Image (cartoon, rainbow, N blue to C red):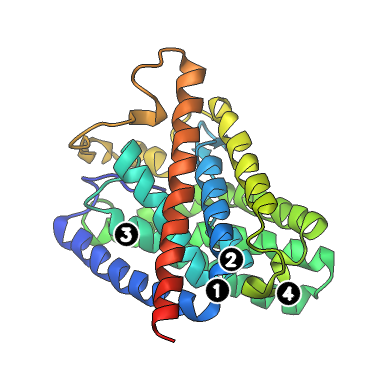
Amino acid sequence: MHIPDGFLTPAVAALGWAIALVMIALALRQTRRQLDDRMVPMMGVLAAFIFAAQAINFPVAAGTSGHLIGAALAAIVLGPWAAMLILTAVLAVQGLLFQDGGLVVMGWNIVNMGVIAAFSGYLTLTLARRLAGESRTGTLAASFAAGWISVVLASVACSIELAASGTSPLALAVAAMGSVHALIGIGEGLITSAAVGLLLAARPEVLRGGAAAPGGRTATAVLFGLGAALLVAALSPLASRSPDGLQTVAARQGFLGLLQAPPYRILPNYTVPFISHPALTTIAAVMLGTLVVFAGAVLIGRIATRRQAAGG
């Protein structure tokens, strides 16, 4: 669902940046009120896992692929405001280092996958748990629903942005994006509920108290989480090569030609230029990105907690 440059007009893209910057400022303020520095490493671990998992596209119907967004999972663990900062770190590294997602339109990518997906997933989780109960089964069902709805609503938001830019008629965009991402959302829901299930089995305290979770900053927990993210990164060559949902819709509706090439290339298409082996270059690039995202999310968390300390 990463929007590339060219699909949105400059005016629409500028509006996206304005909204994103306001929401980032609010997220920094809310996060420093809700979390303390003990959970900063968890922000890094979640960001690293989400980045690595996003590199593994899974096939869906009709030659289309999808990938985890991860905003619902991050919101379940740390709340929607921290989840937004985590996704901001992921999207920034993807756009700046790997040219995955446009730079001009990055504001809307942050809004769609960071704000809308995180808050819709968190609200869905809250409502679903009231209906399904607090049992393990109820929590897993609520997590699946949170993951699914986060993808669908983010895709609808993307459709509105495309329509506002005159790229695609609203009805066609919503129908096409909504239908394909309803399928992708099933994968998101399954991954989200599986991850929550693992946390319930291995570290249930992480899901109980956010900043109050015991052991949140232990080196063992951080190293284990980062190691798991790197293991996921090592599986990146298994990713489906089929186009993602937005690319499929763009090709079918005839606006794929609007895509603008990035102004520079550092690690294009998740490859390292001096490594020629197809699998090894992908693994190296995704592992590098995983570490950079981990560091970036931790830095954002440190900024928030330092501001908390400075503010008393």
Residue 94, percent from left and from top: 38, 43
Q: Amino acid at mark 1?
A: Asp
Nearest to viewer (mark 1 / mark 3):
1
Image location (x, y in percent) of residue 268: 33, 29
- Dividing the picture into quadrants, the one containing residue 24 is bottom left
Mark 2 or 4, nearer chain start: 2
- Give whichever of discs 1 and 4 has the lower sequence position: 1
Residue 39 marker: 2
In the image, is 290 to the left or to the right of 4? right
Relative to 92, residue 19 above or below: below
Q: Amino acid at mark 3?
A: Trp
- 296 and 234: which is toward the camera: 296
Q: Nearer the viewer, residue 151 or 312?
A: 312
Image label count: 4
Residue under the image location 21 percent in, 40 percent down? 258
Q: x, y percentage for residue 246?
A: 39, 44
Q: Crowdedness of circle 4 by 10 Å Cα count: few (<14), some, many (20+)?
A: many
- Measure how far apart labels 1 and 4 are at the Cα level: 26 Å
Residue behind mark 3 = 108
